[in-house]
Amino acid sequence: MDWNNVTLGDLLDGLKEVEWKPPRPLNEFLLAPNAFMLPKSGAKWNSRIKNNLYYYRSNYVLMFMLSFTVCFLRNPVALVSIIIVMGGLFCLNDPVATGTNDLLLRIMKRFHSRTAMRLRALSNTLSDGNLGVKRRGNQRLYILWLPRGTAVLLIVMFGFLLMWRSAAVVTLAWVMLLGLGLPLLHATFRSPNLKSRLATAKDEFRAVWRGYQAGLQNDYTQ
């Protein structure tokens, strides 16, 4: 396969359709002799990057996951702050807001059922049991006793405050630098080996064969 003729869209489509096998062994991924060298040209680098992203896809995903885990294990509050911000933003969706309100009311009911009943009456929404929401006219959504917009604003502000206090942006920057930078560095310097070329040719043959079979089925149905 001429990887120079493969566009980024083609590569992403291929990664969606291909089988995701276990990561390649370490002796092939890192420890193979004479495996790392500078690409001789921009075209060689372009071809090498796409080939390695396709062939070592599982290794690169594992590297990103390890980078994410290591960085946030050192700063777990940063991860909590990001989850709080994302959770607040998700509450802008009506079903998510209703589901969050129901969950909080169920938790509160265990400790103070009378307060939970009053807050449920204030919520003034109807849930269909599937996190769907049916609102009458201009009814407002509530999360506990707060209007949904106010609750989202407070949640997001609290999350951003926690992000600032925990330096979550710095931690996230390290995740991106390590999780994306290291695979890109490896894909740049790792020269494609014979196994990667054979695997690519085998996958290409399978894709052509699937298209050939689909064509035969279409002929039979016409």
Image (spheres, grey):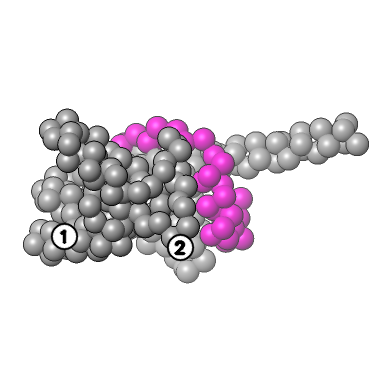
Residue 37: horizontal and vertical position, in percent? 36, 57
Front label number (2 vs 1): 1
- Whether residue 56 is visible here, answered yes or no, is no
| Residue 32 position by quadrant | top left
> Type of residue at label 1?
Phe
Q: Secondary structure at mark 2?
A: helix
Q: CA distance from mark 2 to mark 1?
A: 45 Å
Please name whichever residue, 95 or 85, is drawn nearer the observer in this view of the structure. Answer: 95
Please name whichever residue, 95 or 89, is drawn nearer the observer in this view of the structure. Answer: 95
Left or right: residue 176 versus residue 46 is left
What label does residue 158 carry, if any?
Answer: 1
Left or right: residue 174 versus residue 200 is left
What label does residue 45 carry, if any?
Answer: 2
> Type of residue at label 2?
Trp
Question: Residue at the spot x=18%, y=33% of the render?
Answer: 113
Q: Number of callouts in the render?
A: 2
Residue 55: horizontal and vertical position, in percent? 46, 44
